[in-house]
Image (cartoon, coloured by chain):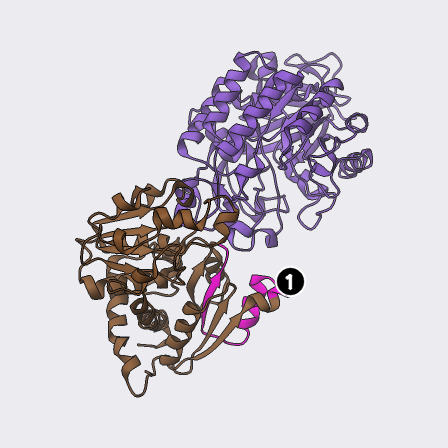
Chain colours: A brown, B purple
Amino acid sequence: MLNNLQLNSEGKLKHFLSIEGLNKSLLTEILDIAESFVGIGDHQIKKVPLLRGKTIVNLFFENSTRTRTTFELAAKRLSADVLSISISTSSTSKGESLLDTIRNLEAMFVDMFVVRHAISGAAHFIAQQTAPHISVINAGDGQHAHPTQAMLDMFTIRQIKKDFSNLRVAIIGDILHSRVARSQIQALNILGAAEIRVIAPKTLLPAHVESLGVNVSHNLNAGLKDIDVVIMLRLQKERMSSALLPSESEYFKCFGLTEEKLKIAKPDAIVMHPGPINRGVEIHSKVADGPQSVILKQVSNGIAIRMAIMAMAMQKQGAM
Amino acid sequence: MDQIHIKQGRIIDPVNNINYIGSVYIADGKIISVTHEPAGFKPDTIIDAHSQIVCPGFIDLSTRLRQPGQSRKATFKSETAAAASSGVTTMCLQPDTSPVIDTPAVAELVKDLAEKANYPQIHPIAALTRNLEGTELSAMLSLKQAGCIAVGNANQSVKNLLILRRAMEYAASHDLLVMFRPNDFWLGNNGCVHEGAFATRYGLPGIPEEAETIALAQCLELVGLTGCRVHFGQLSCKRSVIKIFQAKKYGLHVSADVAIHQLHLTENDIIPFDSNYHVLPPLRTEADRQYLRHGLASGTLNSICSDHQPHDLDAKLGAFPETEPGVSSLETLLPLMLKLVADQAITLEQGIASLSENPARVLHIKSGALTVGFAADVCIFDPELEWRVNSDNWQSRGVNTPFWGKTLKGRVTHTIQAGKIIHCL
């Protein structure tokens, strides 16, 4: 079902909604195409004409700086016309439904929606409801998926580690509420990572988390052993008020990544974070800014990956 | 009133131990004889039930017809037509209408709407607490006198156990049945699917089975304390069945039902983000489904309800967690029951009893059997007739069902309510 929705009859990307249902060769194709876009930011003219004349609407029902900006830049570098709308301050506050918002924008002849929404399944819903010529890119839906983030993370890992088959990856923190973690786990499994470990207290792990294809640890020291890639997740402040954790300081004591703890992982381990980071809550500044951190590289790679995915989803309309 | 002769059908009436081919004779709205033709009987209508099954009309312990208050979703007219075409002759109506059935006036309005829809056998369930808020008792005695058959709190939890205890004590004082869907509000945590692998994969808020089993255990303890007669509705998991079994063994007067879709679907059947699978309690695991079937076969669960909840399109149009829960399920009730028989989970007699004899016992009503002198509520169905679930074959205003487009086997050909033919295919 997810598969049918995301791919056209020739198995090409139509929407990009979740990693689930995509195969290794398609994920690899995304990474390869992104590779070809990496240099563009260094050029005098930072543009390619692939999406000239196309209109892309960034529809953000949730706040975002990084994701929205990189999507916007990616679209502009593909020569598309871009409109960014923050809906939290727009018509839905007047009671307009998600569907009506989409219908209205559709009537303005747009070619692609990039959607972020607080409810799981929102991007699928839009993809199901929207006119057939429009592509939908999921920029994060509830706790379900954030597939472009996962792909830029895979891209960053591949840049440094080359091959996934020997990699042991630890994902640390609030797995329960993390759409990023869900998409990363799916991508790592499809790309054939040797092991994925999730490390968190039980309150921040979903039920039956092993069913996602991961090993589970509740102890950071034990969990970091032999790890090649350390992925930290952001801890939202509201987790304290909903009794999932006692305090930030206790969390940092148990699960915060410090230089000392990082030494338990392999010496050449890299540290990643989807951002925005909470210094002193999930990660110590010395690690975030340290030599093993690739956090800013992730941000730069976000543009190339999003260019690749947008261009691929527009293939049917003559791009590429 | 017309005299009706139903002939040559296979009569299955679990109460009277009947399972043979014969005739049913109806006059003055009542069953006057089974098998033997009464002297001087002159039928106005003869129904040839050759190769069909003739059984007591079905009694549905949990329905929502959306009136009063939500006629954009459905009306008594549309939903009683759906019930009639499904062989259902008696329905209990959940109190979460708008306004809530917590005053005699609303109960009378419901009875009035039923009369106007020419389907009088609708029994309102009164709210257990005022406006279902779980804080003050409803006027249960007045509500009983206004025609309410039981009291219940629909999908709302009674969070305060002291209030629940007092509500049960008060209901027991007036010999009122409490119909209770166990659900702990806090553990339910606004979830929309079973807390399991599916919820984890799709990042959907989950409802653990403990939200049901803990609320059930608490209420069972209060049954012991208060002596209240309680029927537990729409149980969804294995451990609830075990708890009911143990409670009965211990001597508590409790009974329980299961919604028909829980006996067929699990979390694995959910098409991701398809809101037609959004139901409460949520579809659980294969082990739960198997054990619910087992519970029905062994009699621990004595009834099947449709848990009919028709919705308008808008209610199901949205991202999954934001859509309204519930299935329009009257019209698939019989074929899905017959599927249980085909799967050898239960016998046909058990299936029919779970839709007639047993719910009648729960409600203490003289119905659910072809006993001479009882109101003539009869369902005649063709167990082999295949039909497609589509708008040509559908009466309910709600088309929200996971079975839409599927071909099902078993169709009601005639429904007789108190001697009146209310459906004829």
The N terminus of chain B appears in which quarter of the rendering? top right
Residue A28 in the image: state x and y as whole percent.
Answer: 24, 63
Q: Can you give x and y, in whole percent of width and height, for residue A289 in the image? A: 31, 65
Q: Tell me the chain of label 1.
A: A
Q: Which residue is mark 1?
A: A95
Quadrant of the rendering where the C terminus of chain B is positioned: top right
Q: Quadrant of residue B353?
A: top right
Q: Residues within 10 Å of mark 1 (few under 14, many from 20)?
A: few
Using the image as rendered, state which of residue B365 and residue A222 is in the foreground. A222
Residue A7 seen in the current view = no
Residue B114 among those drawn in magenta:
no
Percent x, y of residue A207: 40, 40
Q: Amino acid at mark 1?
A: Gly
Q: Is residue A250 left or right of residue B336?
A: left
How many labels, in total?
1
Q: Is residue B85 left or right of residue A182?
A: right
Q: Position of residue B103 (x, y in %)?
A: 80, 35
Any part of residue A274 in sight: yes
| Magenta span | A92-119
